[in-house]
Image (cartoon, rainbow, N blue to C red):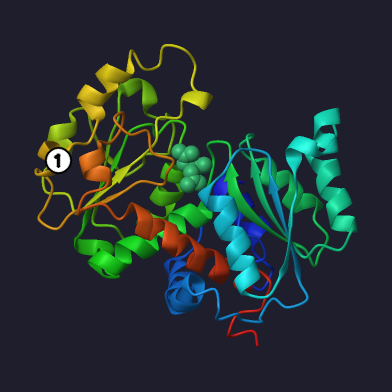
Amino acid sequence: MSMSMSMSSLQHHPDGRLRHLLTLQGMSRSELETLLSRAQALRPAALDGREALGSLQGRTVVNLFFEPSTRTRSSFQLAARRLGAEVLNFDVAHSSSRKGESLLDTYRNLEAMGADLFIVRVAESGALDQLARAARPQVALVNAGDGRAAHPTQGLLDMLTIRQHKGADFGGLKFLLVGDILHSRVARSDLHALRALGAGEIRVCAPPALLPQGHTLDGCHVHARFDEALEGVDVVMMLRLQRERMEEGLVSSLEDYHRDYGLNAQRLARAAPGAIVTHPGPINRGVEITNEVADGPASVILEQVSNGVAVRMAVLEHVLGAGPRAR
Ligand code: NCD
């Protein structure tokens, strides 16, 4: 069985409803669009904390993050609170994980306290799979990033942001993903979503040492030269250079990287008029992107962050069966 099939059957109920959100791989266009439309409708409530919605009242959501996070963890917390859930932020640094307790044991203990949903970030690719196989039937899991494998809510919030600027029909658009694709779970989830949503053309540009092998880039046009890759693109999707996941020597120097793959305003002028620039954060300013671009008119980076709250509300509702259809 292929990885996408096993992951997909793991995250869906037998009747086809989404039970967990582990990956965007194998999700259909209509499933993605249902989540994106709901997120769009939730945007006003997402951005206005006063408008509390009660759909997750009485539910307990656990944030279980074994890797650092600023945006993802905070926005999941806000999303859960704005839907009325109780949120437990598991504190890894002061937990028995420090004494060697395994991920699975940690999970089982928190599950035994009556949590309804776990939002999990881990360094090991595929670790969510193991939890999904162990989860009690009524418990849902949401992947907040596992190693380099998947970061599905980031993929969704990227798609929502692009839709807001470029419309829901991606067929006429050219997309470019730039940088550390090898180590990027964001790139993988973006690629899954772009393909499912019918992206017109997907280009990638990276140093050869940061291009993944295998099927990750199926259907993409690989460009070695950044200037050439940028010609006429509508959406430039920048990635962080993930030095913490990197073996020594994959990138010769940050100066060389910036010279060859750093986005500056002069380069960006090669893109199509009205092109937008995304970045999942955290930004290495002056490495993959200059300040003038990150803070400039084409940047939608903070809109991505705002959309993160709405997307995460939509996902939490959906996997807990608390969305508008289920009520
Ligand atoms: C990303 C992640 O952790 O995968 N950050 C995020 O969630 N916004 C990207 C990154 O760390 O480069």
Q: What element carries label 1?
A: helix
Q: Which residue lies furthest to the front in this view?
A: 50
Q: In which quarter of the image is residue 79?
A: bottom right
Q: Is residue 72 above or below residue 222?
A: below
83 left or right of 312 in image: right
Which residue in the structure is indicated by mark 1?
265
Give the camera-side residue of 72 and 102.
Answer: 72
Please report the residue visible at 80 percent of the width from the left and 56 percent of the height from the top.
135
Q: In which quarter of the image is the C terminus?
A: bottom right
How many labels sit on residues?
Answer: 1
Please report the residue visible at 19 percent of the width from the left and 62 percent of the height from the top.
172
188 left or right of 252 in image: right
Q: Where is residue 12 in the image (x, y as percent from the top left)?
A: 64, 64
Q: Is residue 59 above or below residue 139?
A: below
Please report the residue visible at 37 percent of the width from the left and 20 percent of the height from the top.
209
Label 1: few (<14), some (14–19) or many (≥20) C-alpha neighbours in 10 Å = some
Asked whether mark 1 and ligand 1 are closer than 8 Å, the reply comes as: no
Q: Position of residue 175 (x, y in %)?
A: 25, 50
Residue 25 appears in the figure: no
Q: Position of residue 260 (x, y in %)?
A: 21, 24
288 left or right of 315 in image: left
Residue 187 appears in the figure: yes
Residue type, numbered disc 1: Ala
Q: Position of residue 5 (x, y in %)?
A: 58, 52
